[in-house]
Image (cartoon, rainbow, N blue to C red):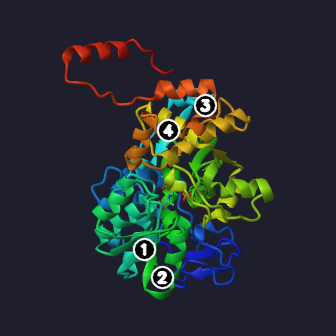
């Protein structure tokens, strides 16, 4: 298939520029807006040169590629390359065989949320353990093609892990800026393991973004934060996979965590393009869930309908989404408005309970991903999601990303006494039933047996 060209369009003032005209901070010089990638066939006003790929041919081709031995066919991003023609030379694609992530049913979580049917698309099952890999293969491939030697990002830990890995594969050098003391160890260890220059700044994520913004103006460093629109081209592909895994049926709802607020719009773009191409008859409602302590989008929607965003000083144990001044908030508002979804906020205790419930299904995820289930419960309680509607949670990170959180939770050391006191009796018993602290025993067979017997008689959580 012929590789189509693409342009970049400002999502605020709609100015279209050539792919090589973008500045190093990926901001529109006229209005400071962020760009999105557009193709001849994604633009309703496209001229006669736009040729829409044929939906049935695409479905067949994408499935067929899964059995090929070529690396780009085995990638769950690049097997959809017909809808992301962003690199001219496919030989130069940098891939770790990302994507093709599993789809799990969560019957006990569905019951806890009060609905009949719940599925999770587990993006934590990517090569570096988070959804960032799908975006990084795309943007890093562009960086490699354009001859950059250095790439950089500011991160709460997952973007940096993914960038470090893909840069290493491509033979590029990478610089990671992370907030000191505020990222999970698993993620910090990854950027070192993959050989990045890791800089822990004594500030938060928002402070790291500021410093990096200054740097890219002065050095030829390719910026790989999610303001880079090529990241989102990769991150739209889980939308394709998701409906493919549902035999081209569309769920009523997709729920994502919200941090820097790019992923919601990436998925919305994926669904919108499939709809435009006739691959799906409608698009699902995309809802975004934030942690109460890092809720700038939620607040903005409550206070001014999403017209303006007032940054907050973010604080949550779900460190991946500890972001107070999200770059892509306008894109997220647009995704909510075009799909008809909602934004909710959830407490630390609600996040912990949801994480334990997802873990107890044998699936597991990192804390930031669990906000999706916690938010689902709220949307169901408010009557926005009904029992028979089909819901897909996007689990964004692997449970091993933040094992310290999990251990503290199960040892009942995660929350302060004041936080514990906020729990109702039924919430307390739900937590108690899920908590599985390790038991330390003397190596005495009698004692081990007696302990096991007492545990075997305890009921399992429903
Ligand atoms: N879930 C996880 C596990 C994340 O790492 C992130 C973002 C999000 C959800 C939120 O996605 O920013 O597109 O709204 N992590 C970034 C990072 C900020 O640096 O790894 P978003």
Q: Is residue 292 visible?
A: yes
Task: Report if the CB atoms under discs 2 and 1 are less than 8 Å apart.
Answer: yes
Residue matched to label 3? 113
**SS label for mark 3:** helix
Q: Is residue 345 left or right of residue 408?
A: right
- Badge 3: few (under 14), some or many (20 or more) residues near its Cα, within 10 Å? many
Mark 1 sits on what residue? 152
From mark 3 to mark 2, how far is it between C-alphas?
A: 45 Å
Q: Is residue 48 visible?
A: no
Q: Which residue is mark 4?
A: 355
Give the residue at the far right of this rendering.
304
2 or 1: tag closer to the N-terminus: 1
Of marks 3 and 4, the one in the foreground: 4
Q: In this rendering, is residue 174 above or below 215?
A: above
Does mark 4's beta carbon lie closer than 8 Å to ligand 1? no
Tell me if mark 4 has few (under 14), some (14-19) or many (20+) residues whose alpha carbon lies within 10 angstroms of its own.
many
CA–CA distance in space, label 4 to label 1: 31 Å
Q: Pick the residue in front: 444 or 428.
A: 444
Label 1 Cα neighbours within 10 Å, binned few <14 / some 14-19 / many ≥20: many
| Occupied quadrant, residue 45 | bottom right
Q: What residue sits right under mark 2 in the picture?
A: 215
Q: Does 184 sit above or below residue 215? A: above
- Give the x, y percent position of residue 68: 30, 54
**Mark 3 / mark 4, whichever is N-terminal:** 3
Name the one closer to the observer, 133 or 89: 133
Q: Residue at x 23, y 24 (%)?
A: 442
Which one is closest to the eye, mark 2 or mark 1? 2
Q: Secondary structure at mark 4?
A: helix
Residue 438 x, y percent position in the rendering: 34, 30
Which residue is more in the foreground, 384 or 43?
384
Which of the two discs, 4 and 1, labels the residue nearer the N terminus? 1
């Amino acid at each position: 298939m012929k590789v189509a060209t693409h342009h970049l369009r400002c999502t605020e003032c709609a100015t279209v520029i050539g792919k090589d005209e973008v500045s190093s901070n990926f901001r529109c010089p006229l209005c400071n807006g962020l760009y999105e990638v557009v193709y001849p066939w994604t633009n309703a006003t496209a001229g006669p040169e736009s040729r829409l790929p044929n939906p049935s041919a695409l479905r067949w081709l994408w499935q067929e590629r899964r059995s090929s031995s070529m690396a780009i066919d085995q990638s769950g991003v690049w097997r959809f390359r017909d809808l992301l023609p962003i690199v001219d030379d496919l030989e130069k694609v940098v891939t770790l065989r990302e994507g093709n992530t599993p789809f799990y049913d969560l019957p006990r979580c569905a019951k806890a949320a009060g609905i009949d049917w719940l599925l999770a698309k587990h993006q934590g099952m990517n090569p570096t353990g988070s959804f960032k890999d799908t975006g990084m293969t795309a943007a890093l491939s562009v960086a490699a093609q354009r001859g950059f030697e250095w790439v950089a990002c500011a991160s709460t830990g997952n973007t940096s892990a993914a960038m470090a890995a893909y840069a290493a594969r491509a033979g590029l050098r990478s610089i990671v800026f992370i907030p000191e003391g505020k990222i999970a160890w698993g993620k910090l260890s990854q950027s070192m393991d993959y050989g990045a220059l890791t800089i822990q700044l004594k500030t938060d994520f928002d402070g790291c973004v500021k410093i990096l913004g200054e740097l890219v103006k002065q050095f030829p460093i390719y910026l790989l934060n999610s303001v880079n629109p090529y990241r989102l081209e990769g991150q739209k592909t889980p939308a394709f996979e998701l409906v493919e895994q549902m035999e081209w049926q569309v769920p009523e709802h997709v729920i994502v965590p919200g941090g820097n607020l790019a992923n919601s719009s990436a998925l919305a773009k994926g669904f919108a393009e499939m709809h435009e191409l006739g691959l799906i008859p409608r698009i699902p409602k995309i809802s975004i869930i934030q942690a109460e302590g890092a809720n700038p989008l939620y607040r903005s929607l409550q206070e001014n309908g999403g017209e303006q965003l007032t940054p907050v000083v973010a604080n949550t144990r779900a460190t991946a989404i500890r972001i107070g001044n999200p770059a892509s908030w306008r894109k997220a508002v647009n995704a909510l408005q075009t799909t008809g979804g909602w934004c909710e906020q959830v407490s630390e205790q609600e996040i912990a309970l949801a994480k334990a419930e997802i873990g107890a299904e044998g699936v597991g995820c990192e804390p930031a991903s669990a906000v999706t289930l916690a938010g689902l419960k709220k949307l169901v309680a408010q009557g926005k999601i009904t029992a028979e509607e089909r819901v897909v949670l996007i689990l964004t990170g692997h449970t091993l990303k933040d094992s310290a959180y999990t251990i503290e939770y199960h040892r009942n050391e995660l929350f302060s006494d004041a936080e514990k006191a906020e729990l109702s009796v039924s919430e307390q018993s739900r937590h108690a039933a899920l908590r599985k602290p390790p038991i330390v025993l003397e190596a005495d067979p009698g004692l081990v047996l007696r302990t096991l017997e007492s545990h075997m008689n305890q009921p399992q959580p429903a």
